[in-house]
Image (cartoon, helix red, strand yellow):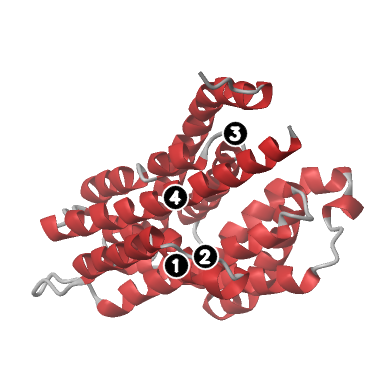
Amino acid sequence: MPVMDGSKSARAQTLPQSNLRGALWVLLSALAFSVSMALVKFMGEGYPPPMQVFIRQLIGLLVLVPFILRDPVQAFATNRLGLFVVRAIATSLSMMLAFASYQQLPLAEANALSFTRTLWMVPLAILMLGERVGMLRFLATLAGFGGVLLVIQPKGSEGVALLPALYGLAAAMLLAFSVTGIKALSRSHGQLQLLSWAGVFGVLFALPAAIPVWRLPSVHDGLLLLAMGVTGAIAQFCYIRGLSMGDATVLAPVDYSRIIMTSLLGLVIFHELPPSTTWLGVAIIVGGAVLITWHSQRYRERVADAALDREI
């Protein structure tokens, strides 16, 4: 009978508890994200995406200020400033396109398109990181984009508008590019450095787009915009916290609880009821994304175990 070495045994014993904690953080992130996007849509008529993105980025940076002030030199230490700039541009554009998509599409359908981020990471990994993609990931990606066609297909007078749907897909692609950049930067930078540069550049790149459409909000609207920014910052913090604790294959399905939350908010606040084809498309997109995540995580675990076996 095979005997599990101490390192693998300890890892196996700590996973269930850490996965539970991680899942709770990701669930909180999903809830905060859903509320934030509902507020983005609710405020969309009077406050365009560039203005909302600037407020969101500014609040996120202000939350970081106390942590940055503890050691500002370390917070901004880097030798890869160019990659930070490129990633920040991609992130800012992604947020503006995503906000436009959420404002113009039903919440559930806009949220479904955001899930294509995982699908976009497959071709980006090939182009940017030179990764080799097996048949399973390739087929899962194709199936996922097939689900996208079901979500955005014309449905008579109540069909999904093509341009906002393209906004959502482009936002997901840019976010996947940003995540790929994070993978490269995280090899030599800590979490505070990543967030600090993202916060500063996020504000700088959002400001020029926000100035032409800026309007002074009323007290009521200002409180709602503040809530949008705070819940967005909470969502980001909880998501990063959760991923640092648990297994990606366990946490990814928890993150997809967003589709239930946004659908309920869409029904209650905006009286939106997605058709059956949307739910079928969502199921295919989520299934493809979960399969890709599971396959990628299994591959990393096999590589890690093989390296550990060689050391032993």
The residue that disc 3 covers is 245
Q: Earlier in the sequence, mark 3 or mark 4?
A: 3
Q: Residue at x 79, y 43 (%)?
A: 67
First of labels 1, 3 by sequence position: 1
Determine contact: label 1, label 4, CB under 8 Å: no
User: Taking the image as drawn, is residue 215 in sight?
Assistant: no
The numbered mark at residue 295 is 4
In the rendered image, the vertical position of residue 271 relative to residue 135, given as above or below: above
Please provide percent x and percent y for residue 299: 52, 49
Q: Secondary structure at mark 3?
A: loop
Q: Are marks 2 and 4 in contact (CB under 8 Å)?
A: no
| Residue 3, quarter of the rendered image | top right
Q: Is residue 85 left or right of residue 78?
A: left
Q: Amino acid at mark 1?
A: Trp
Residue density around tag 2, few if under 14, some if 14–19, many if 20 or more, within 10 Å: many
Q: Which residue is mark 1?
A: 120
Q: Amino acid at mark 2?
A: Leu
Q: Do callouts 1 and 3 mark residues in contact (Cβ within 8 Å)?
A: no
Q: With respect to residue 151, does 268 lie above or below?
A: above
Which amino acid, mark 3?
Met
The residues bearing labels 3 and 4 have C-alpha atoms spaced at a distance of 19 Å
Image height of 310 relative to 296, above or below:
above
The answer to whether one can see residue 20 in this image is yes
Image-quadrant location for residue 37:
bottom left
- Residue at the spot of label 2: 175
Residue 80: image location, x then y, percent: 80, 68
Rendered residue at 84%/62% (across/down): 78
279 with respect to 119 (left or right): left
